[in-house]
Amino acid sequence: MKKSKILILLITLTLPVILYLFLRSFGQNEFALPVFFGDEEKKFCSDSTISAVDIELIDIDTKDLIKLSDTYTADYKVIHFPNTHDSEIQTLKNELNRILNTFDELPITIISFQPIVDQKVDQLGTASFLPAERTNTYLYPIKYKDVFVNCFYAFPTEAWDGKHPSEETIPIENTLVLLDEENKIRGYYDGYETKEVDRLILEIRVLLSNK
């Protein structure tokens, strides 16, 4: 019994590495990831006229205003809208740090969006979600949450009734969205689930293998 458990553990740990090496050598055209909402309709977007250059955010570290379009500085972006009051929030932070540690040399950033709690910038007391390099926390006007969730990123919420193109249904506060170098959506993941974050890491490797 113990031997079988050890074997399962070894397979679990080594399979992503083996698959990555295979992709690097043979699979560049076979395992291309989909681009979500390149053509599909974002059916729950109520205002498609608003663009990323129309929304101003507050950079929590500098307290400066910044356009959403100017936050996409790294090659790969993992964006999310965490519920910072969740009693299990450390689980999410651990998984996000694992992503950064896995790709130590890769230009990747974690972008955390939180609602503005005070209109006066000099009185904002919200701390950065992840106080580490390659992470950014931005405060957004709460009136734009629907635009973020349903227009810009088209989260796989329950409203899709299981018919989201990703075939996922994930609570908003759990969802991680992967953006590529062209800021196209390449995947949706549950940031509280280790297996889901493993899939995110693997799919970043797939993107790298296709470069």
Image (cartoon, rainbow, N blue to C red):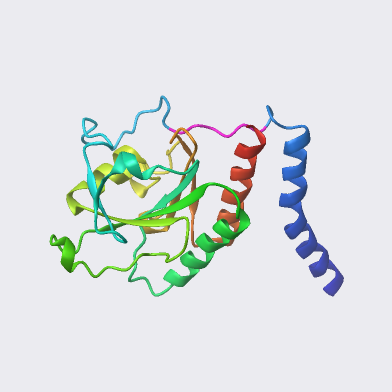
Residue 168 visible in the displayed image: no
Q: Quadrant of residue 27?
A: top right
Query: How far from the left and from the top, in percent, is residue 194?
Result: 58, 61
- Whether the magenta-drawn stretch holds residue 144 is answered as no
Which residue occupies 75% across, 52% down? 15
Q: Is residue 207 left or right of residue 128?
A: right
Query: How far from the left and from the top, in percent, is residue 116?
Result: 21, 59
Tell which of 49 and 1 is nearer to you. 49
Pick the quarter of the image with the N terminus: bottom right
Q: Is residue 116 left or right of residue 137?
A: left
Tell which of 127 and 14 is nearer to you. 127
Pick the quarter of the image with the C terminus: top right
Query: How far from the left and from the top, in percent, is residue 166?
Result: 48, 39
**Magenta region:** 31-36
Which residue occupies 32% across, 68% down? 127
Query: How far from the left and from the top, in percent, is residue 143?
Result: 17, 49
State the predominant SS element of the stretch in magenta.
loop
Which residue occupies 47% across, 66% down? 93
Q: Is residue 10 left or right of residue 139?
A: right
Tell which of 98 and 146 is nearer to you. 98
Q: Quadrant of residue 86?
A: bottom left
